[in-house]
Structures are given as C-alpha cells and as structure tokens.
C-alpha cells in the first residue's frame, strides 16, 4: 500500500501539498484535507469557519483536489485525500481524480463536529451504515483505492461491523482513530482483510509497537505531523518492527 508504513493524518483546513512535502522523507503516505464536497457539507464547513475552525473552502472542491494531488506528484509519498460528503455524486467525481493520481480516496466517517454530523457526513455515517456502504461502493466504482476514516468510542457503534461493511462494499483501508483505546484495533484486524492504519497518540517506539502488536498494518500521525523528531522516531520504530514484512 505504501512504505514506510507511516502516514500523515489530515488536519482539517491545514493539510495541503506543502504540508506533506515538508516532511516527506519520514512518511509513505499523506492524507490531505479534509474537504467538504457537496453543498450540505460546504455549508457545515462555513459554519465551522464562523466559529474559528480551519476549513478548505475553494470554489470548486474537485478541482482543488486535482491541483493539490498534482502538486505532490514529484514527491515520493503516496497521497490520499480525506473528503466529507452527504451525497454520492461528488464522491464518484473525486474518486476518478484520485484514481488518475494513484491517490487514496478517504471517506470521512470520523468528524464529530455537530454541524457536519447534522449535514449527514462525518461520524453520522457510523450510525447510518447504509449510507456509508453506498459511499464506499461509489468510491470503489471510480477505480480509486478507498479508505474510510473512523473513530472508536461512538455510542452504539460496533467498529467490527462497520469494518465488515466497508470491506463488503469494496473498501481497501480502515483508518482507525482509537481514541485512547488502542485495543480496539485488534478485533478489526482479526475480523477483516482490510489494510488497517492505527491513529491516536502515535509518538514513539512504544506506541508503534503496541499498535502493530494489535495487528495494524501501518500507523498515522495527526497533531504531531509537523514535528520532524517525532516522525523520525516513528519511522525508525515502524521499520524496526516490520523489516522484511510485506502485505
């Protein structure tokens, strides 16, 4: 999928091509975004900006994805793009763009901001798995490699069931924010053949060893993604744990 098995997790309104290029020597994958694709999620993003959160709000989000992925092409990092949508048509369109750039399309079932959930995107998709399944199916049909970003600890949500739905709809990757409950990774890796990226608190050899011990295929770094020392340590730890292992 990518090497080294270290990814940069998207930070809304901050994670662009320049951000990924600045630390490219330490990672194998960078998820840009997130970006709102349709009118419902773009309206939610505007509301988030009104309360001082960072959001990408270009006039044409699909063209923005294309431009950002193109800007990363000289960089030896596999790109991904984290997207939020309440409807499937823009997912199909942006999936084709990701396919053409050999980029991963990451569907956001992770954002817990109330405005985005009310729009029918983000974490709300964990509770409405029919809609999540539809988005994964559409994304897969575009020919892109498909990831779904999820979070643990959501009341009434069984991550194993969600993972199996993603796999059944043709998804390739589950990007799991463990929310300080690292052990949630193990049941997911046991129950599916998805490529699992573990996220949350990845900072050093100890956290890398723990997540990979639970069966994760890779780890991702979010808030510390611009800390070169942490990324260097995580890169070294992943290489030490997975040297010679190919999946």
Image (cartoon, helix red, strand yellow):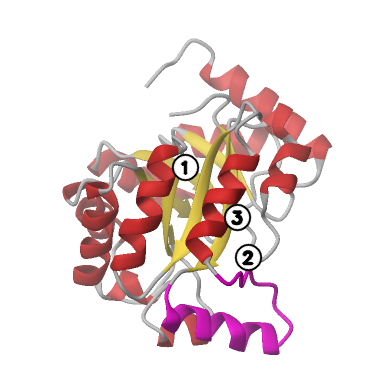
- Disc 1 versus disc 3: distance between alpha carbons? 13 Å
Horizontal arrangement in the rendering, residue 196 relative to residue 181 (left or right): left
Q: Position of residue 145 (x, y in %)?
A: 35, 40
Residue that label 2 marks: 12
Q: Position of residue 3 (x, y in %)?
A: 54, 24
From this view, report whether residue 124 is shown above or below residue 165.
below
Q: Position of residue 197 (x, y in %)?
A: 47, 42
Q: Residue furthest top?
A: 244
Residue range in magenta is 38-59
- Residue 178 visible within the image: no
Q: For residue 98, what is the image quadrant?
A: top left
Viewer-closest of 143 and 199:
143
From this view, report whether residue 56 is shown above or below residue 160.
below
Q: Confirm whether the magenta stretch covers residue 50.
A: yes
Q: Quadrant of the N terminus?
A: top left
CB contact under 8 Å: marks 3 and 2 = yes
Residue that label 1 marks: 197
Q: Residue at x 70, y 78 (%)?
A: 53
Residue that label 3 marks: 10
Element at badge 2?
A: loop
Q: Residue at x 62, y 84 (%)?
A: 48
Q: Position of residue 75 (x, y in %)?
A: 66, 30
- Disc 1 versus disc 2: distance between alpha carbons? 18 Å
Q: Residue at x 40, y 71 (%)?
A: 85
């Amino acid at each position: 999928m990518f090497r080294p098995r270290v990814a940069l997790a998207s930070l809304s309104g901050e994670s662009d091509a320049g951000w990924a290029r600045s630390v490219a020597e330490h990672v194998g994958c960078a998820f840009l975004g997130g970006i709102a694709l349709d009118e419902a999620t773009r309206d939610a993003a505007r509301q988030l900006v009104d309360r001082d959160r960072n959001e990408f709000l270009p006039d044409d989000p699909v063209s923005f994805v294309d431009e950002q992925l193109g800007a990363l092409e000289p960089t030896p990092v596999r790109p991904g793009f984290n997207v939020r949508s309440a409807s499937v048509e823009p997912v199909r369109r942006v999936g084709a763009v990701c396919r053409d750039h050999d980029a991963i399309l990451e569907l956001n079932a992770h954002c817990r901001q109330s405005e985005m959930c009310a729009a029918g995107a983000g974490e709300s998709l964990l509770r409405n798995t029919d809609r999540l399944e539809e988005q994964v199916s559409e994304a897969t049909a575009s020919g892109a490699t498909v990831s779904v970003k999820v979070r643990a600890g959501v009341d009434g949500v069984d991550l194993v069931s969600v993972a199996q739905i993603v796999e059944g709809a043709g998804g390739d990757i589950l990007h799991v924010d463990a929310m300080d409950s690292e052990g949630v990774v193990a049941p997911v890796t046991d129950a599916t053949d998805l490529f699992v990226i573990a996220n949350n608190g990845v900072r050093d050899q100890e956290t890398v060893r723990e997540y990979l011990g639970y069966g994760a295929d890779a780890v991702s770094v979010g808030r510390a993604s611009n800390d070169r020392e942490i990324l260097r340590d995580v890169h070294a730890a992943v290489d030490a744990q997975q040297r010679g292992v190919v999946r």
